[in-house]
Image (cartoon, grey):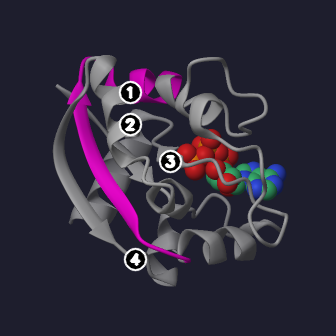
């Protein structure tokens, strides 16, 4: 069965949205098989966001992602990667489809430095990304 990695970002944890968000994935047929609360280090975030590390917004992204507690979760299910991305919604909460997590719980505000979208969750984009990220966060 396919697995995918979800991270509840610091804004989701601070707003107490963990249960609501987990339920959204469960209603889509996914099952939580691992869960870990932590504060992300810069080194782990650089690996996690290796595709973005050279981009102008990366320092703000790293600052936001390490600003508080996060929860890393592995979900399992049929087409787990695509299913989770669909339930998550578009990167920009203002453009996220109705009923998605980023649409329903996003508050349309930017993070403190006004450059990073506080979009509540990370969801692996591809099967390869999911495998790499599960190794990174769960060893
Ligand atoms: P995530 O990887 O967090 O699930 P995503 O796959 O929808 O989000 P990515 O393109 O991988 O989007 O971007 C990773 C994160 O970097 C986004 O969630 C967002 O917080 C931030 N980000 C992406 N593009 C930009 C941008 N142009 N300006 C500012 N922040 C951005
Ligand atoms: Mg991504």
Which is in the foreground here, disc 2 or disc 3?
2
Which mark is first along the chain, 1 or 4? 1
Which residue is under mark 4? 39
Which mark is first along the chain, 3 or 4? 4
Task: State how far apart marks 2 and 3 are (Cα).
Answer: 15 Å
Q: Secondary structure at mark 1?
A: helix
Which residue is under mark 2? 20
Q: Residue at x 43, y 47 (%)?
A: 17
Q: Secondary structure at mark 2?
A: helix
In the image, which disc is placed on residue 51? none
Q: Secondary structure at mark 3?
A: strand
Is the N terminus in the top left, top right, bottom left or bottom right quadrant? top left
Mark 1 in CB contact with mark 2 (< 8 angstroms): yes
Q: Residue at x 67, y 67 (%)?
A: 61
Which residue is under mark 3? 122
Counting the numbered discs, the total is 4
Which mark is first along the chain, 1 or 3? 1
């Amino acid at each position: 069965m396919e697995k995918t990695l979800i991270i509840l970002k610091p804004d989701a944890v601070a707003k107490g949205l963990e249960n609501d968000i987990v339920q959204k994935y469960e209603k889509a047929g996914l099952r939580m098989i691992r869960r870990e609360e932590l504060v992300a280090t810069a080194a782990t975030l650089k690996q996690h966001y290796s595709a973005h590390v050279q981009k102008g917004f990366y320092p703000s992204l790293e600052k936001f992602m390490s600003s508080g507690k996060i929860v890393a979760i592995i979900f399992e299910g049929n087409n787990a990667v695509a299913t989770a991305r669909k339930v998550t919604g578009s990167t920009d909460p203002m453009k996220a489809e109705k009923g998605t997590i980023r649409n329903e719980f996003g508050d349309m505000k930017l993070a403190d430095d006004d450059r990073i979208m506080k979009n509540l969750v990370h969801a692996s984009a591809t099967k390869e990304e999911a495998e790499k990220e599960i190794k990174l966060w769960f060893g």
